[in-house]
Image (cartoon, helix red, strand yellow):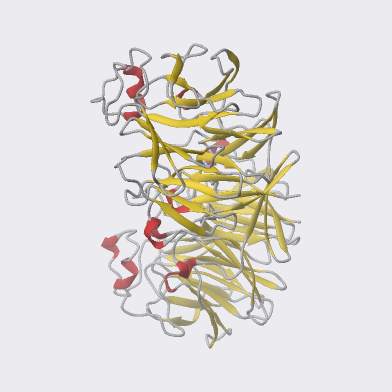
């Protein structure tokens, strides 16, 4: 339709194309005002052309991201966007998805292709593995179904951990909750030692069921938030699996994160919806075809948002909270 | 073939309705704008059209050149309300740049039929420049169609026209034409349409062009040529003497000049703002790869900017605040 004259793969990364003057972009809705900074994390050379998959923050202002670079599965940046380190792992983990830093500064990551959740320390040593390495649980899913996004329709039952787990996070007492995932329709609960406790979910559009639980988050009130992307909804559960709330009419929610005051839902269509702790929608950051297209979202101690962009060349973007 | 920058197909604009609308501000230095995504209400004949050119008259009405068969030009008031179509039913090959004359007539260039037409406010075509459906000889290989490197086949400066991009009227009444995708020329005509002079030629040296995509004139009579595939804008005096080159642009498409500043719209996603007297860069909005894939730009008397974009939004207003 248009004469495409620009090399898409190099947009946003070529130094010759840097501005002499920095253009500032602000986005305001309600009492929230953010400054949008694209490609905020300063990528080292090895990560040029690679994608940041999922992202999280720790309590010290460091930002951790999983990548699709096999040699550098986890990259860490500081609060100024400077690259700090890679974490390289002793075992091959294939497609790494969600990441989370727990209260002891250990890091949980999941692999959707090796069907495990792995806890590693700050230098990449493996502390714990949950699930059966390279052995997906039996959910009846038809792996040969070509259309990945429609594969979930073939799931027949809720399976045990894991089949394509998307994320694992810690709740307030140290219990672990995992969203599972691309090949399953479950939330699993483990105790703080990794012992399996229970699961809930099942396939479908009914309340309490899932299509693809794409991520998971436990807020400060110990409520478990699960974005069910294909069904445009986020369901909120107690830690026992009792459904507390279903937020509908979202636009393909990918991730949920919270701080003391607010819950943030990242929607693939280019929006972050902000709620108070009583589920009331108070702000929406974004618009049709905006660049705020997040695969994964995180918030730091100052209320700044970070997301891994679905537009690969935009990398890790920051929405800096303004006064 | 356009490749979708998304790995998925976004939902339509209609289904993406915020419950809480947000405000987007672009700022650099003293230049601060509110970005208004859906400023104009498009009537159904031209909804989702490709906009090839934008222009403002002295009452701040906004004119757009649409690539819609039979509806080449649409006029909106300063609040974005549709006023009327101009030139309905006219067979336009492919609309490109648009400009207003001091009598509020409208020049529209046609880069497929190799002409530029002057319309009055009643939509009548009152003048034509160029030879209808006949391109001039420049060595250009027209069989290459819209291949973006086709301009490399241009061998020499040709007469008017070969895929002309824009025609403007200067304050003394003379007409300047940038010509174009199949030529490497700036032509000067008398107000009656008689050719006075041409300059240019394919290449990268001063006074040469690789796709003169647009032309405009400033308040002291200098001619600014947006030399797109050389990533530069060249400034000449009325007679074609080269005065200055602004380099370092990213596929510049069009320049709009106010009393103080020149706003250069770059298709890679940026608007670079220069002091129009001393050519100093003072501000930049957007960045390489932003959604501001701007093909045309104009401004009104309050320094608001109107951008004709290729992309999900076609007409965006940057309201000066």
What is the x, y in percent for residue A8?
Answer: 40, 56
Q: Which sits in the foreground, B254 or A226?
A: A226
Tell how many labels: 0
Query: Does residue A253 show up?
Result: no
Q: Which sits in the foreground, A78 or A139?
A: A78
Query: Does residue A231 show up?
Result: yes
In this image, A102 relative to A275: left or right? left
Name the residue furthest left: A144
In this image, B169 relative to B252: left or right? right
What is the x, y in percent for residue B264?
Answer: 58, 67
What is the x, y in percent for residue B74?
Answer: 59, 48
In this image, B265 relative to A68: left or right? right
Figure quadrant of residue A218: top right
Considering only vertical position in the picture, is B293 above or below A295? below
Q: Which sits in the foreground, B292 or A210?
A: A210
What is the x, y in percent for residue B10?
Answer: 47, 36
Q: Which sits in the foreground, A27 or A129?
A: A129
Figure quadrant of residue B141: bottom left
Residue drawn at (50%, 43%), measured in percent from left and top?
A55
Q: Quadrant of the C terminus of chain B?
A: bottom right
Residue drawn at (42%, 31%), measured in percent from left and top?
A166
């Amino acid at each position: 339709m248009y004469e495409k004259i620009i090399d898409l793969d190099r947009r946003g990364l070529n130094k010759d194309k840097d501005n002499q003057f920095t253009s500032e972009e602000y986005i305001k809705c309600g009492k929230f005002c953010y400054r949008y900074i694209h490609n905020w994390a300063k990528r080292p050379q090895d990560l040029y052309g690679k994608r940041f998959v999922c992202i999280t923050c720790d309590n010290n202002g460091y930002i951790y991201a999983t990548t699709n670079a096999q040699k550098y599965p986890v990259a860490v940046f500081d609060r100024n966007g400077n690259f700090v380190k890679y974490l390289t792992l002793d075992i091959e983990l294939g497609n790494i998805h969600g990441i989370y830093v727990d209260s002891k500064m250990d890091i949980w990551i999941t692999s959707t292709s090796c069907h495990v959740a792995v806890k590693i320390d700050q230098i990449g040593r493996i502390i714990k593995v949950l699930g059966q390495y390279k052995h997906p649980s039996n959910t009846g899913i038809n792996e040969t179904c070509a259309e990945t996004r429609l594969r979930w329709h073939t799931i027949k039952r809720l399976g045990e951990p894991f089949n394509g787990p998307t994320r694992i996070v810690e709740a307030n007492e140290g219990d672990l909750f995992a969203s599972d995932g691309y090949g399953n329709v479950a939330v699993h609960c483990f105790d703080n030692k990794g012992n399996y406790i229970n699961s809930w979910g099942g396939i479908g559009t009914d309340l309490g069921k899932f299509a693809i639980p794409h991520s998971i988050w436990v807020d400060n009130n110990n409520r478990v938030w699960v974005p069910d992307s294909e069904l445009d909804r986020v369901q909120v559960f107690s830690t026992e699996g009792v459904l507390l709330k279903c937020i509908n009419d979202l636009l393909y929610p990918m991730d949920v994160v919270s701080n003391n005051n607010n819950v943030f839902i990242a929607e693939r269509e280019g929006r972050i919806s902000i709620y108070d702790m009583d589920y009331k929608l108070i702000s929406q950051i974004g618009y049709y075809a905006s660049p705020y297209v997040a695969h994964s979202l995180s918030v730091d101690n100052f209320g700044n948002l970070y997301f891994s962009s679905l537009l690969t060349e935009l990398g890790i973007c920051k929405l800096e909270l303004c006064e | 073939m356009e490749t979708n920058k998304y790995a998925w197909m976004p939902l339509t604009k209609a289904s993406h309705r915020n419950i809480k609308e947000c405000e987007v501000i672009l700022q650099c230095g003293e230049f601060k704008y509110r970005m208004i995504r859906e400023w104009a209400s498009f009537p159904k004949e031209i909804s989702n059209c490709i906009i090839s050119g934008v222009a403002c008259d002295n009452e701040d009405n906004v004119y757009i050149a649409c690539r819609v068969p039979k509806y080449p030009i649409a006029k909106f008031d300063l609040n974005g309300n549709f006023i009327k179509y101009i030139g309905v039913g006219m067979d336009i090959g492919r609309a490109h740049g648009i400009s207003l004359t001091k009598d509020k007539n409208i020049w529209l260039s046609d880069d497929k039929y190799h002409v530029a037409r002057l319309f009055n406010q009643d939509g009548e075509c009152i003048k034509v420049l160029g030879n209808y459906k006949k391109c001039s000889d420049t060595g250009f290989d027209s069989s290459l169609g819209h291949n973006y490197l086709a301009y490399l086949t241009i061998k020499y400066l040709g007469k008017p026209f070969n895929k002309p991009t824009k025609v403007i009227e200067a304050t003394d009444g003379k007409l300047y034409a940038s010509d174009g995708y199949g030529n490497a020329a700036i032509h000067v005509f008398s107000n009656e349409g008689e050719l006075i002079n041409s300059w240019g030629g394919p290449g990268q040296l001063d006074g040469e062009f690789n796709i003169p995509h647009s032309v405009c004139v400033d308040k002291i009579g200098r001619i600014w040529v947006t030399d797109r595939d050389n990533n530069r804008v060249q400034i000449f005096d009325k007679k074609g003497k080269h005065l200055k080159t602004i380099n370092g642009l990213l596929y510049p498409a069009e320049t709009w000049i106010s009393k103080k500043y020149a706003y250069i719209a770059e298709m890679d996603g940026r608007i670079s703002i220069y002091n129009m007297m001393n050519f100093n860069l003072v501000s930049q909005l957007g960045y390489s790869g932003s959604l501001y894939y701007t093909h045309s730009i104009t401004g009104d008397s309050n320094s608001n900017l109107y951008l004709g974009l290729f992309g999900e939004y076609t007409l965006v207003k940057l309201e000066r605040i």
